[in-house]
Image: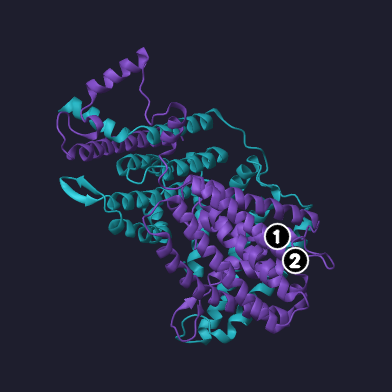
Amino acid sequence: MRGIDGAIYEIHGMDALAARKQWMNEVHPLVKLLLTLGYIVSVVSFSRYDVIGLTGMAVYPLAGFLLAELSLREGCRRLRVVLPIVCLMGLPDLFLDRQPVLFLGLQVNAGLFSMLTLVEKGIFAVFASYLLIATTSLDKLCYALRLLHVPKVLVTQFMLTYRYITVLLEEAERMTQAYALRANGQKGIRFKVWGSLTGLLLLRGMDRAENVYEAMLLRGYEGDYGYLREKLPFRFGDILYFLFWAALITAFSIWPLLPLVGDLIGRIWI
Amino acid sequence: MHMADALVAPAVAGTMYACSAAAAAYSIKQVRLETDAKKIPVMGVMGAFVFAAQMINFAIPGTGSSGHLCGGMMLSALLGPCGGFLTMVGVLLIQCLFFADGGLLALGCNIWNMAFYGCFAANLLVWKPIMRKGISRGKIITASLAGCILALQLGAFSVVLETSASGITELPFAAFAMVMQPIHLAIGLVEGLITAAVLAFVYEARPELLARGGERAGEKGRFTFPGTLAVLGAAALVTGGLFSLAASSAPDGLEWAIEKVTGFTELEGTGEWEQSAGAIQELTAFLPDYGFQGTQSPWGTVVSGIVGALAVTVLCVGVCLLFRFFKRRKR
């Protein structure tokens, strides 16, 4: 995982993206959440060897990136955690799945295709999640979760954790920086101070929790937490957006649209 | 140990979501019963603490490498198994959404593998029995080490089970397990040492935090040791049974559904509309069945795919750019 300052930067970056006045950010959060989940389920449901059919599913995240004006480079940067694991898991297929398949006139192992689909699935799922979170603020996401009847305790806890992550990350950064300045050239925290350094962070966190609770009480907290000031109604555009993507994702999951389109173009031009 | 979406089949992901949801529902009920309004904000801040603590590199003596804290075991010692579990759910959701660490679909698996074993199994099978007759520094170290090793071994084995049941890789079950278990034994040992160091420090500085353990004084835990074992055993049986249904040799979901209804994996249209559509498709098919017409060339599928992909890309990019253009003009 990245360093502490990298994580703080990433969280602020995501907040800034989600706060933009952009058309995609205005789409109802529940619509985006359901589409993301449906899309990921469709992607992982593809057969192990259907590389071409699965490639068609790139339509949703790529069109989303364009519409939301998101950087593809930033999306690819988010693959750094998932991609190595997925590649590592797919690698044995290259050697173990030896069913011969003709590809471009060459005989290759079917494992090549299963590895490629695995990588594609990993990439598309990460892109779809990024598209969701880069266009939906945490308040709106929590609102959508409540609409899905996710228990209030869980949603409030999720929201509070997120709110206090940057605060505690900054605290942790100050402590590790102070340690690093006194331990020149040393990599990581020495065994002898594992307990005291992290323990102090924990105790400071606990004290902060007490202060947070008192501050919340002063602002009228009674166990209930308002996620948004007002209800978000479903607009006609939201429904249209949902129906359009749901239909397209379903079509790409059921029919081999890419080869069919290629077919049609071939018939027209050749 | 975070699983990516690509590594799980929908059936496995759904099963694990159901198992994790059951554990979450129980935890929520218990936390609500405690009627301690302070607990939710404390859980929120503790979740943030675990997240921050995971960023700290702990140098492992004599190896030159560093270890990290996972937090499940520690949270359950401080907040109780239910509070710890819910806190870990929040942490895992944030890691998945904001840092692409673990997938949204695989979240149920990740909650089960890391939060359930770390908070429930380690706490109820190790921490509580050891601490039954009082807390001491030695007991904290023993319980932390044993609890973390147990949680990580169970979690790693679950990853192997879930991946194998999903049928996404040819990697043999035994070979995968042989790689995962020893690695996670070492990771569990390091995490156990970090957890022990932190909890021992807390015990010295604020012993009341550990004594509370997230539960009201005098209240007996609902789970007994044999009870916990029975629940875990039942969960393993149910999970194993459901996983076997989702084995890789099963046909594609849609084909399976069609086969169940019709007895065939593909449907032959007999109506007038289907016949006409079929005729049009045959007429326009430049590359029928993804091959060139009248030939068996393997290039057919590839060319179809590439041409189709290019056409769809151009169409999509064009439509999106047009959409953006008009939206901007409107603004």
Q: CA distance from mark 2 to mark 1?
A: 9 Å
- Corner quadrant of residue A214: bottom right
Point out residue A225 in the picture as x, y percentages from the top left corner: 72, 50
Residue type at mark 1: give it.
Cys
Point out residue A255 in the picture as x, y percentages from the top left corner: 35, 32
Point out residue A23 in the picture as x, y percentages from the top left corner: 48, 39
Rendering colour (chain A) = cyan
Q: Residue tagged by mark 1? A: B82
Q: Are marks 2 and 1 in contact (CB under 8 Å)?
A: yes
Residue type at mark 2: give it.
Gly
The chain whose colour is purple is B
**Tag 2 secondary structure:** loop
Q: Is residue A270 left or right of residue A197?
A: left
Count numbered badges in the picture: 2
Q: Is residue A166 above or below residue B189?
A: above
Residue A162 visible to the viewer: no
**What is the number of the mark on residue B214?**
2
| Quadrant of the frame with the C terminus of chain A | top left
Residue drawn at x 48%, y 49% as measured from the top left: A129
Residue drawn at x 16%, y 49% as measured from the top left: A106
